Amino acid sequence: MHKEEKILTPAVIIGLNINKKEYERDENSLEELSLLARTADFDPIIKLLHKRAKIDPAYYIGSGKAREIRIITAQNGVEAVIFDFELSLVQIRNLEKLVKCRIISRTELILTIFEKRAHTREAQLQVELATLLYSLPRLRHMWTHLHRIAGLLGTKGPGEK
């Protein structure tokens, strides 16, 4: 009997080097992320370690590198881009809009691995709780556009016009 061969999702792995002295450490971290990606059923077909002086508030890696990643993903049929760092909600939204594929942070990737490996009900609940706690800050302000800025007694409540 032979094992079923898993179909791996093609992915791009991206790291960022801000401190030039720690380039080797960042390369090792990117290699570790690549192994984590394989464990989570991703195929890291391309690994990029981007050198940058500072973090870009809109894309983390800068708009030029983000456009380059969009081209790479389109040319190689990539379905996910995995980052070796945490991204803000705005950065994730901007990158997904530009790159047009799934954006995954290192923490989200690790939670995915735990989710796949959790067999007991207690382990599954612990992973689900960790995932929800991780997602909470990203969801907290998602529906604020429905809330009224001010209201008086007898007026309509949040989300009502």
Image: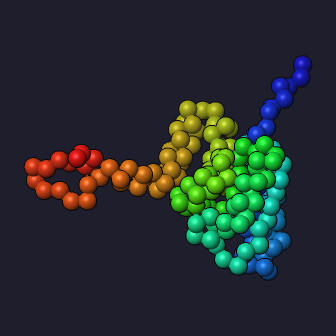
With 132 as the anchor, is 149 left or right in this view? left
With 147 as the anchor, is 76 left or right in this view? right
| Quarter of image, res 126 | top right
Residue drawn 68% across the image and 38% down it = 117
Q: Position of residue 26 (x, y in %)?
A: 78, 68
Looking at this view, is 118 or 64 the one in front? 64
| Quarter of image, res 86 | bottom right
- Picture layout, residue 51 above or below residue 42: below
Residue drawn 41% across the image and 55% down it = 141
Looking at this view, is 18 or 130 the one in front? 18
Q: State whether residue 99 appears in this view.
A: yes
Quadrant containing the N terminus in the rendered view: top right
The residue at the far right in this view is: 1
Q: Position of residue 65 (x, y in %)?
A: 73, 64
Looking at this view, is 15 or 113 the one in front? 15
Residue drawn 53% across the image and 48% down it = 130
Looking at this view, is 112 or 155 the one in front? 155
Q: Position of residue 124 (x, y in %)?
A: 57, 37
